[in-house]
Structures are given as C-alpha cells and as structure tokens.
Image (tube, grey):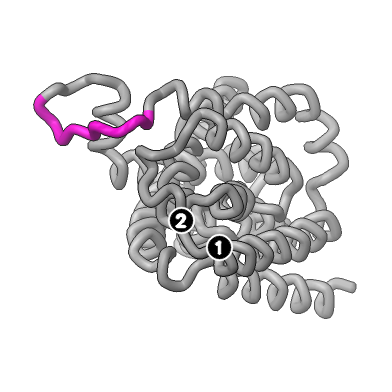
Amino acid sequence: MNIWELFSALVLGVVEGLTEFAPVSSTGHMIIVDDMWLRSKDFLDEKVANTFKIVIQLGSILAVVVVFRNRFVDLLGLKKETQSFSGKLRLTHIIVGLLPAGVLGVLFEDYIDEHLFSLKTVLIGLVIGAFLMIAADLISKRKSTVKVDTVDQITYKQAFYVGLIQCLSLWPGFSRSGSTISGGVLLGMSHRAAADFTFIMAVPIMAGASFLSLLSKWQYFTVDAIPFFIVGFVSAFFFALVSIKFFLKLINRVQLIPFAIYRIALAALIYIIYF
C-alpha cells in the first residue's frame, strides 16, 4: 500500500463517518463515492473494496457505542454504579423497533443487493426521503406540543411504528436516520428523542449484520490490505464521533429541513453529472 492508497482509505472513512448517522444516507454517499472513486482505482479489488466498506462501518458503529456508552451499560445491566436511567427505555423497546426492518431485510436481502444498489435508485431514495423529512418538520410545527421529550418516554407502540418506518431505509439512499427520525417526529417525539432512539437502535442491527458479513470475508485481511483497513476504520470512527456529537447538539434547533434541502441539491447535482 502506498501513500495514495492510504489517502483513499482516509477519504472513504471520512465520507462514512460523516454520513452514517446523519439523515443524508451513508449508503447513498458510499455508492456515489464507489462509482466516482473506488471503481477508478485499479489497486482495489472489488471484493476487498466490499470488505473495506464493512470495516469502516464498524468504525462508525463504535463511535455510537462510545457516545452512548452509559446508556448501553445501563440497558445491559453491566454496571450498577454507573449513571442510572430511571425511565422506560429497555432492551425490549430496541428489539420491538428492530423487528420490522430485520424481518424484511432477511426476506429481501438478495433482491435489494441485486436490484436496488445503483445511482438511479439512490437518487429516488434521496429525493423521496427528503420530502418525508420536510413533511415531518412541517407537521410537527403545526402541533402545539411534543409528547415525548426524551428517549425514556418512548412507548412500545411508538418503538414498533418507528421500526415500521425504518423499513423505508432498506431502499438505498433513503437513510436509516432520516426515516426513523422523521417517523419519530411524526409520532410526537422531539427531534433529539427520535435521534437518540435511532442511534441506539442502529448499533445491534448494524453491528450484527457487519460481523456476519465479515465471517465470510476474513481471507481478504491480507498483509497488504490491513493498513488500508486500519486507516479507514480509524478515520470513520473519529469523524463519526465528531459528527454524532455535533448532530445531537443541533438537531432540536435545526431540525430536518436543512438536511432535506442538502439531499435534494445532492440528487440534482448527481443527475446533472451522470444523466
């Protein structure tokens, strides 16, 4: 691996870290970067590239675990003397929220991989997802009160409905964060409560899927590839950490419309360039 190749890993890790948990679709961005960057590099075998994407996603997931470490420790009951959350959020809320997308993901995984990972489908996801986010903000502003201020006030019914809306994110470009935060806001949650639930819920399903994918790809962890993987992992972790903290501080104030505008502008730019 030379300096240029390691720089490529750094850039891809930055893209993953900054977009994985923002409501702008990390999958959409990675598909775009894949077409514009990875496929133009002769040094990177397609199977190694796919393994690399899983590795950097794990870096982003680790960042969520770090940000919400006290919450996860409390949920798992691992350390009684840690910060206590006396509200209602339990592991069962997370499981209820994960079930719909988990079941559909398993049933349609092959179809999604074969037919939905392209620039055209990403453009559709970016635009429709943006309209959902705009609708969520506009509808929430018409309501005089927010019923759920914190993640601990989420009910099982709300968790399930957010899980149903999360199924939209199976379409590349739609965004897991965009769909679930929008769904939570439409159900009466504050933007911060919906974002917290989204991030916490993302860890088990993303980590599980990533580890299962890596089980069949260990042969690609060669001496030449490992430095490439490490740079991408560290880059994704660091930039996801910064992105998540920044996003959570601002989300109640800026809400979703600015991200929706970005998605529409990005889709327009891609359409002009490629079509």
Indicate the secondary structure of the residue bearing disc 2. Answer: loop
Rendered position, 172 above or below 81: below
Q: Residue furthest left?
A: 81
Write down the region rendered in magenta: 81-89
* Left or right: 58 in relation to 248: right
- What secondary structure is found at the residue carrying circle 1? loop
Mark 1 = which residue?
143
Visible residue check, residue 41:
no
Q: From the viewer's perspective, is residue 44 above or below residue 128?
A: above
The answer to if 261 sits in the magenta stretch is: no
Task: Name the residue nearer the viewer: 268 or 223.
Answer: 268
Image coordinates of residue 88 in percent, x first then y, are 35, 30
Task: Identify residue for label 2.
Answer: 146
Whether tag 2 and tag 1 are in contact, CB under 8 A, the answer is yes
Residue 155 position within the rendered picture, expressed as x and y whole percent measured from the top left: 47, 33
Residue pictured at 78% horizontal, 23% vertical: 107
Q: Is residue 242 left or right of residue 7?
A: left
